[in-house]
Image: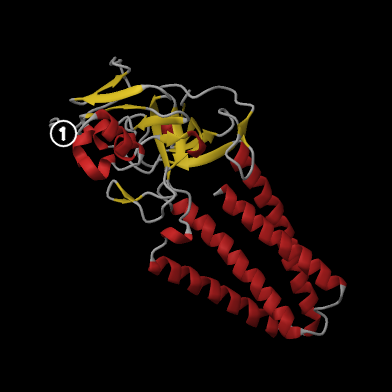
Amino acid sequence: METRLFCIGLGMLAYALATKQLKKNNYFASRRTFAALWHALFTAGSAFVLLLVVSVSMDTGNIAPGAERMTPGQKTTWIVILAAAALWGFFRARRNPSAAWEQTVKEDLEWAETTYSAVFLAAVVMYLFIQAFKIPSGSMRMTFVEGDHLFVNKFVYGVRIPFTSTRVLPLKQIHRGDVIVFRFPSDNPSELQCGGVQYGKDFIKRVVGIPGDTVEMKEGTLFVNGKSGEETYAQYTAPGRIPPAPLGDKATFQKTWEERNSGRTFGESLRDNFGPVTVPAGSYFAMGDNRDHSCDSRFWGPVPMTNIKGRAWFTYWPPSHMKATY
């Protein structure tokens, strides 16, 4: 989302700079049709920003759908709305008397300058420091429940240098038990995992394995480096355990898991009987606290450090659920 905000800010900045230059050259003074088209461009851009804001507020956890994940109906709706906004802007400007053309362009310029300033500031804050997140599913019950809103601390594991995967000035390292928010580890928009396309989505899970750990599930019990610990946050609600499936030799299963094919190959049997696998360098094993109802690393592999956005920080909505995560 922060990348999209940054791009929107750049677009508004470009519009503002171009408008200033055209005004300086008196380009709008005698070109009524061009002034109307310029205003139509602004109204379409404003409609796009509003659509993005609405899609974020109505989204169930992922931060606004990208074009590659929109349904044909959604794409058509966006196109129709943007076209309608542009037409409204064009004919609104055309109906204005000549004396009002300059005032219309002046108002557009003021709004564009205000928008790009606010958007750039929001993008910087979201990219470097804090981002809001909405719990999309029940995979983290009862730590978080569906609909909870929380802030994600994005600087605790280090500030990410823009347009790179490099982090600097980390306050702490990732430890077992940390609740992290991350982008789903796939670069293929058509890849299916856990019954659907997860590409581009933000997930929230708990770290149970760090680089070098051996992780295994036996009849629903988690073992890390051969030991089972007391997990007060984990819950198991299924009436029974799924029998184990033959996973083959360890090396083959490790390869299958790292390539994100374990869930597609072995299905639900991995819920209760998994591994063992060794967490690769630079990656983490993440699981939902609601162990029987979680699409997690058991099914789609390790979470690379480069995909991790930050650590869950503070639940701020609803008021009855307000709490610090750490």
In the picture, measured across the screen, residue 14 lies left or right of residue 325, that is right
Query: Picture quarter containing residue 70?
Result: bottom left
Neighbour tally class for label 1: few under 14, some 14-19, many 20 plus, Cα within 10 Å? few
Q: How is the image coloured?
A: secondary structure
- Helix, strand or loop status at disc 1: loop
Q: Above or below — where is 226 with respect to 29?
A: above
Query: Hey, what amino acid is under mark 1?
Result: Pro
The residue wearing badge 1 is 246
Q: Is residue 322 visible?
A: no
Give the residue drawn at x 41%, y 50%: 199
- Left or right: residue 193 versus residue 243 is right
Q: In the rendered image, which quarter is residue 262 located in?
A: top left
Res. 133 in view: yes
Q: Residue at x 37, y 49 (%)?
A: 198
Relative placement, left or right, of 79 versus 290 is right
Please count the marks in the image.
Answer: 1
The answer to which of 127 and 41 lies nearer the viewer is 127
Q: How far across and how far down the image is residue 59, in percent?
A: 43, 51
Instruction: Indicate the position of residue 230 as horizontal and vertical percent values.
Output: 30, 15
Residue 289: percent from left, percent from top: 32, 29
Vertical relation: 86 (above or below) 52:
below
Percent across and percent down for residue 325 are: 46, 26
* Rendered view: 257 above or below 323: below
